[in-house]
Amino acid sequence: MNPLISVIVPVYNNADHLKDCIKSLKTQTYDNIELIFVNDGSTDDSQKLIEQEGGIELISKDNGGAASARNRGIDEAKGEYLTFVDADDYVAKDYIETLYDLITKYDVKISFAGVQMTSSKDIPFEVGKEDRLIDNDTIMYRLCNQDKMKETIIPCKLYHKSLFENFRFPEGMTYEDLASTYKLFYKAGKAAETDNTIYAYFMSEGSVMRKHYDIKNFRSENRAWDERIEFYETLNSKKLYEHCLVSAQRNRIANYCKCRKYIGKADAENSKITEKFKVEYKIIKSSTELSGKDKILFRLFDISPEFCYKVLWPLYDK
């Protein structure tokens, strides 16, 4: 018999999209799953909608954020494997089967698949694509690429539950994906991936990526990068460490500009983000991980953050 797989869904005011999420999970081709929906203090009809459905374990708690809801789901999960689906997203019918087949085929503790960002409730999923085994250095490198959503987000992956021994998602912050998945990949040692697009990341107005950028987002994102840099420095790989620093530098610049635009100049400057940039810039000035565009951008920001904010950021942020 196939092992039990726990599907953990954090729910907060997702009433408009829950039915699509539930339908996609209830029609899975994999035959041994438990659905755990964690209502994180919703004030809309989310809990009522879940209660009307059969075959779902509903956990209700005070609002504490997505990480808190996922952690509660982990505590209650009985499955040998866990996957996380956001309540306003939906998945292909063979989502769990595909991820589990990768686990068994390559003998790994994490598998992951392609993600499609969409505002449609009915996208054609892509199947029949290639899959592969990925070693630890490769996945750790890819986690710091510019296009790293597939690797970074918590959903679209199947995890062996042992990876969560002595590990929980960081609560009280946003960008918990950025702050956590690299640790899980590293702990797993290797991973399996398919190019099949079987997870629909629905871009509703309530999605985290569409929320107004505020001081909590700013501090959380910077904290996540600070912690990631410290982690990568312990890996004893100059290439990985410098690649992480380059990625962090791009984000330092973006975060500074977003803070200036949406929060205020004082908060950006008091955060010491420009000071961190200058320290890290000295380390990677001559790194082979720097592209030509990076060299120009980093040099300009090192000379004048004000110029980057007033001249370059408006061109990027259209």
Image (spheres, rainbow, N blue to C red):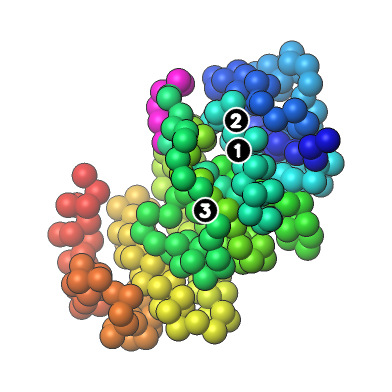
Which amino acid, mark 2? Asp
Numbered disc 2: secondary structure: loop
Is residue 119 located in the magenta-colored stretch of the structure? yes
Whether tag 1 and tag 3 are in contact, CB under 8 A, the answer is: no
Quadrant in the picture for residue 122: top left
Task: Name which residue lies at 66% across and 26% down.
Answer: 29
For residue 230, side relative to residue 64 (left or right): left
The amino acid type found where label 1 is placed reads Thr
Circles 3 and 2, Cβ within 8 Å, touching? The answer is: no
Residue drawn at (67%, 56%), measured in percent from left and top?
108
Looking at the image, can residue 293 be seen?
yes
| Residue 171 seen anywhere in this rendered image of the structure | no
Q: Which of 72 and 130 lies nearest the eye of the viewer? A: 130
Foreground mark, 3 or 2? Answer: 3
Residue type beneath disc 3: Arg
* Percent position of residue 107, x then y: 68, 55
Q: Is residue 286 left or right of residue 222?
A: left
In what quadrant of the picture does the N terminus appear? top right
Residue 318: percent from left, percent from top: 21, 44
Query: In this rendering, is residue 258 above or below 139?
Result: above
Indicate which disc residue 132 carries: 3
Identify the mark at residue 98; answer none if there is no mark.
1
- Find residue 96 and report its horizontal and vertical position in percent: 64, 36
Instruction: Decide which of 85, 80 is in the foreground and name it.
Output: 80
Query: In front here: 92 or 9?
Result: 92
Q: Which residue is mark 2?
A: 94
Binning the other alpha carbons within 10 Å of mark 1 as few (below 14), some (14 to 19) or many (20 upward) gives: many
Residue stretch in magenta: 117-122
Q: Residue at x 56, y 30 (%)?
A: 91
Q: Are marks 2 and 1 in contact (CB under 8 Å)?
A: yes
Label 1 to label 3: alpha-carbon separation = 13 Å
